[in-house]
Amino acid sequence: MHSRTLLSILALALWSSAAFGQIPNPGMEIDSANTALVITDPQNDFLSPEGVTWGVVGKNVTANKTVENIEKLFKMAKARGIPVFVSPHYYYPADHGWRFEGALEALMHKIGMFDRKDALNLEGFEGSGADWLERYKPYIEDGRTIVSSPHKVYGPETNDLVLQLRKRGIDRVILGGMSANLCTESHMRELVEQGFEVSVVTDATAAAQVEEGDGYEAAVTNFRFIASTVWTTAELLEKLGGMATD
């Protein structure tokens, strides 16, 4: 290769590397009048040691203190009057009749993840994998939290979350929940596409770490590229004035 061509390629690579390392951080202001906390899938199958996915997500959930950090977000939002929305994941018997599925959809259906008897039947729901983690129930079942209809694959395109946010004048979202590279990332992408400002709390989520790859690391990269900003739980609480959450 001609030396001048090689130098040009090297220069372009160095420039690209430098530019890539200077990704802007637009930030996001928080105002309870138009900002909401959105939590995806705060359910036993993801966050309880008895949940069907604990074998692949448990290590990351524990390392991030995801369970504790989601609770801190609930406490923070309730204390500051920030509306709280939950986007759950439920599968009913009819959903098991789908004629094709992606890889993780097939796995979720196979292991009975988020299964419920029926949309109108709560038989066997209490304490099941589809139920809320017990420690979150005081926040979710307080009569003020908005629980959307269930999303069916990963994103909110198939539920009424966006409608519920719009009807309450929300255009900024603080996002956490499970699972980082699946439902949480898909919610971030769709909310951004729908014109919301979105920040993601990176240790209020977690993901599977398997032979095929680290879902959490993949998600955090995309959070940084796509969201307006990313925070840890501690950074968010500091931004809001160091509110105690214990």
Image: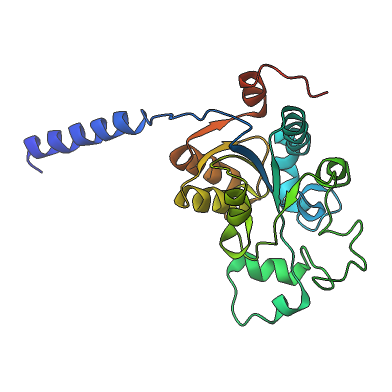
The C terminus - image quarter: top right
Identify the image quadrant of residue 232. Answer: top right
Residue 225 makes an appearance in the image: yes
Residue that lies at the very extreme toward the top in this rendered image? 241
The N terminus - image quarter: top left
Task: Give me the residue at 73% from left, 19% from top.
Answer: 243
Residue 214 makes an appearance in the image: no
Who is closer to the viewer here, 69 or 55?
A: 69
Left or right, residue 124 beside residue 62: right
Q: Is residue 6 above or below residue 231?
A: below
Could you say where residue 236 lies in the image, as x and y percent from the top left?
A: 63, 26
Who is closer to the viewer here, 151 or 83?
A: 83
Task: Give me the residue at 77% from left, 63% from top.
Answer: 114
Could you say where residue 154 lies in the image, as x and y percent from the top left?
A: 60, 59
**By what rule are the colours in the image chosen?**
rainbow
Identify the image quadrant of residue 241. Answer: top right
Who is closer to the viewer here, 188 or 51?
A: 188
Q: Is residue 235 above or below residue 108?
A: above
Could you say where residue 70 lies in the image, as x and y percent from the top left?
A: 74, 37
Disc tally is: 0
Left or right, residue 123 beside residue 84: right
Q: Is residue 120 above or below residue 238?
A: below
Task: Give me the residue at 86% from left, 53% from top.
Answer: 50
Could you say where residue 152 lies in the image, as x and y percent from the top left?
A: 65, 66
Left or right, residue 22 beside residue 195: left
